[in-house]
Image: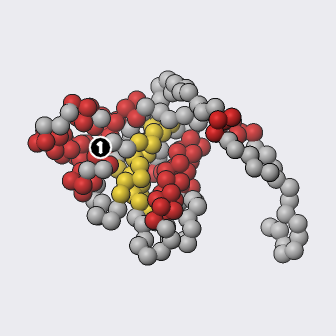
Amino acid sequence: MVALNEPLPPPVPSKDFRDRLAQRRSAPAQALVAPGPSEAELDEILTLGARTPDHGKLFPWRFVVLGPQSRADIAARLAVLVELRNGPAKDQAVLAKLTAAPVTILVVSTPVEGSKPIWEQHLSAGAVCMNLEHAASGFGYSSSWITDWYSYDPQATALFGLTESESVAGFIHIGTLKEPALERPRPDLAAKVTRLP
């Protein structure tokens, strides 16, 4: 531990961490299979996920850990909802993403009215989602951060226990891939970066 008024030690580069970030890619949610995180690993993944930027120390998000049974039950009810509305076949098909992985963490954005800008609070919930993906990767698992139609439908979000003032930041599906995830196009940084003197 560094005493007060003593200079901080110089930064220590971590090639392992840089390599992990350089190889990060989303897994297809429907391709995630067992094994998934143990209860102890999941507790640590949640703890690491919660270490996120949060202006005002509001913690404007919460976690709902969905196991296979709860997701199967909700997916069955969502399927009925699609049928009642005569929804498109795609709305039925995406339910497979919800039920495939061993573990799913629903990140709920819970902004505190009258405090910091709501937009910043939603960004904090998004940062939690990314932290959870990095934490899962640190344990050797693959993950997928997605939303689908049931993230925005009030009748659907009610099935997940959300209130009217809450919204879905993302479903973080965690498990194991049998084959590496495919790479996808990445942005041309020259077109995305502006450097000011």
| Residue 45 can be seen, yes or no | no
- The structure's colour scheme is secondary structure
Q: Residue furthest right?
A: 6
Occupied quadrant, residue 23: top right
Is 11 placed above or below 94 here? below
Q: Secondary structure at mark 1?
A: helix
Q: Residue furthest left?
A: 84
Question: Mark 1 belongs to which amino acid?
Answer: Trp
In the rendered image, which residue does mark 1 sit on? 149
Q: Residue at x 56, y 48 (%)?
A: 135
Quarter of the figure with the N terminus: bottom right
| Residue 106 can be seen, yes or no | yes
Position of residue 195 in the picture relative to residue 56 (left or right): right
Occupied quadrant, residue 139: top right
Q: Residue 133 at what x, y percent from top left?
A: 52, 45
Q: Residue 188 at what x, y percent from top left?
A: 64, 31
Q: Residue at x 28, y 37 (%)?
A: 95
Q: Nearer the viewer, residue 173 or 155?
A: 155
Position of residue 110 in the picture relative to residue 69 (left or right): right
Is 177 placed above or below 49 here? above
